[in-house]
Image: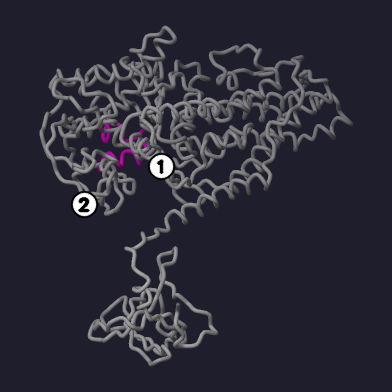
Amino acid sequence: MNTPKRYTITAALPYTNGPVHIGHLAGVYVPADIYARYQRLQGKDVLLICGSDEHGVPITIKAKKEGITPQQVVDKYHEMIKTSFSEFGISFDNYSRTSAKIHHDTASEFFKKLYDDDKFIEETNKQLYDAEANQFLADRFVIGTCPKCGYEESYGDQCENCGTSHNATDLINPKSAITGNTPTLKETKHWFLPLDKYQDWLRSWIVEGHANDWKPNVLGQVKSWLDDGLRPRAVTRDLDWGIPVPVEGGEGKVLYVWFDAPIGYISSTKEWAERTGNNWEPYWKDENTKLLHFIGKDNIVFHCIIFPSMLKAEGSYILPENVPANEFLNLEGNKLSTSKNWAVWLHEYLEDFPDKQDVLRYVLTANAPETKDNDFTWKDFQARNNNELVAIFGNFINRVVVLTQKYYNGLVPAPGQLSEQDEDTLMLLKKYPQIISKSIERYRFREAQTELMNLARLGNKYLADEEPWKVIKQDEERVKTIMFVALQIATGLSILSEPFLPFTSTKLKNILNVSSVKSNVDSPWNDVSKNDTLLKPGHQIGKAELLFTKVEDSEIQKQLDKLTASKKANEISNQSVEPQKETISFDDFTKLDIRIGTILEATKVPKTKKLLQLKVDVGIDVRTIVSGIAESFNPDAIIGQKVSVLTNLAPRTIRGVESQGMILMCDTPDGKLAFVEPDSNVKNGERVS
C-alpha cells in the first residue's frame, strides 16, 4: 500500500486499574501521537483511536483490595487517564471505554459472527479452581512458576519476566491470588479460537510478507511463537466482570479480555462516527486505509497473532500494515512498577510541571525504547531541558524575535541580495521536512526529533556566523537579509516541531503570528519544503516570550526525594513480621534460662552449608552449640562475639555433634541473621531477664 487514502492509528488501551505512567507514554502514546500529528500535517485523513480497557482480572483484584466495586474502579481511573491524556496533548480523535454500551454491542456481535460461522471450538476441560473462594482462577487470579523461564511469580495468562503467554493450567506450583490456596482442577466449558489453523497464513503474512518493514523485535517474537506451534486459545472466561458470552450455554461466563479489548478499537471508531456524523466502515474495511497498532512489547502476541486471526476469521476487516512495538522504559535504573509505586505518574507530573508537557514528551522521545529497554533519570530530564530545549531551540527563537523587535519593531524585513551562506541555509531548511519524514515513516522517532533539533542548531550557527548585532553598525541592509533568513528558519521550526512539541509549536506560531498565514501548497508540512518564503516581508510578529524555562536543582531533588520515599516504603512493606506464637504463662517464661556468653571457637560442620560448630563460654561452663548461621557469618569473624544463649534447652544431636544450647538470633531486612547482642560490659553467665 504505497499511497493510503486514510490512516487508522490505534494506541493500546490502558488498563483502568491505575494511572498512566511514563513507561506507557514512552512505549505507546507519545510515538502514536507524533505519527498521527505528522500525518495530519501532511494533509492526510487520520483517525487516532484509543479508550480505557475496563475488563479483565486486574480490575476485579483492584476492586477487592480497595473494598469497592469494579465499576467504581474503572469510573475513577477512566476519568483520571482521559483527563491526563488531554492535558498532556495526546490528540486522540476518540477516547472511549470498553464498559460503554456501544462496545458491549460491538464485541457481542463480533463473537456471534464467529460463533455462527463455526470459527470456534467448544470444549469442556479442567481449569484451576479455588474451592474456598468458589471461583475459577483465570489469568491474574492465579500465580505460579512460568513453565518457560522459571519465574516464580508468573500470572495465569502471561509471564511478565519473559513475555510468554500461556494458560493458567501450564503454571508450575500454582497458587490462588485470592486465598493463597493450592487450586484444584474442575471441569468447565469454554470456546476457543483455533490459532493453529491460522499458523501457515500468519507465517506467510507476517514473517514473509513484512520481513523488510516490521521491527526486528516484533518479527522475532512472532517467529518464536510460530516456531513453538500455535494452539487453540480460549476466548471466554469464568468471571462475573466483563461482557457476557452472548450465546446459549454462556451463562456465568464473559468474553476473555484479550478477545474483547482489541475490538475496542472498532467500537471507539463507531463512537467517533456517531458523534461526528461520519461513516466508520472505511476506516476498518477499505483497502485504501492503512491500519497501524502502537503498542508495548508485552502486547505483541495479541496484536500480531490473536487479533489478526480474529479479523481474518471474521472476514470483512483490513489487517494492520504495521505494529511498531517498543521495548520497556526503566526509571532510575530500575524496572517501573505500579505495585511498588516506582513510577512517574502522568497526573502527578502535570501537577508538578504544569507548563512543561513538551519537556517530558521531548525527553521520552529522546530516550524512547525503540530497539532496547532504555532508562529515564531526572538528571537527564533536567540536562535535556536546560542544555537542549532552553540553550538551543529556545535561545535561537528568543534571539530572532528580540532582534526583529529591536531593529524593525516586529516587521519582517525585506531581504537584499542573498549571499552563498544565505542560499545554502535556506536550501537546507527546505530539505528538513523530507529528512524528518524519512525517519518518522520508519518509526524512528528519536532520530526524527534529533533532526528537528539539528534545524534549531542550524539557526543558531547561522546567527553566530553572521553576527547581526555587530553587522548592524556597519551594514544595516545586510542585517535585513540576515534577519529575514533567520525568521524563515524560526517559521519552519514552528511547523516541523508540532508532532514532537505541540504546545511549543502553538506558542511559537502565536509569537510569529503565523496562524493566519495562508498555505500556498497542499499541506503545512510541505510549505517548508516548497514555499520559498514562509514569512513574507512586512509581516508583523509578536513580542518575545521564553519558549522554555530552566529546571532548577530543587525541582529535581523534590522528584528524587519522592522516589526515595517510595523505595523506603517498599522496604518496610517487604519486611515480613511473623505472627505472634501461642500465649504462654509467666511460669513457662521463668523456666527459660538465657545467659550471656562469648564465642571461643567456630568451625564449619562438614558437608553442610548452614551449620557452624561453636564453643561458647556461658559463665557456668563452656558449651558446644551447633547453629545454622554459616551463610551469614565467617567462622573467624565471630571469635570473641558476645551472644545470648538459651542454656537449659534439652541437648540434641545434629550431624553427629551434640548441641548443648541455642544462640538467639534475629532477622535483618536484607534476609540475613544478626546476633541478639548484649552490652559489651555484661559478663559471661549473667542472666537475661
Q: Which residue is mark 1?
A: 327
- Mark 2 belongs to which amino acid? Ile
Residue at the location (49% across, 29% down)?
A: 80
Query: Please, is residue 373 above or below residue 494 in the view?
Result: below
Q: Which residue is mark 2?
A: 172
Secondary structure state at the residue bearing disc 2:
strand
Name the quadrant containing residue 664. Answer: bottom left
Q: Which mark is residue 155?
A: none
Check disc 1 and report its element: helix, strand or loop: loop
Tell us which disc is closer to us: 2 or 1: 2
Question: In the visual, does 56 lie left or right of 543?
Answer: left
Q: Is residue 421 visible?
A: no
| Image coords of residue 417 (percent x, y) | 76, 22
Q: How many marks?
A: 2
Closer to the chain start, of discs 2 and 1, is 2
Report the magenta residues as a range.
206-225
**What amino acid type should be assigned to the residue bearing mark 1?**
Glu
**Magenta-span inclusion, residue 392:** no
| Residue at the outermost bottom position | 621
| x and y, in percent, of residue 292 in the image | 38, 26
Q: Magenta part mainly helix, strand or loop?
A: helix
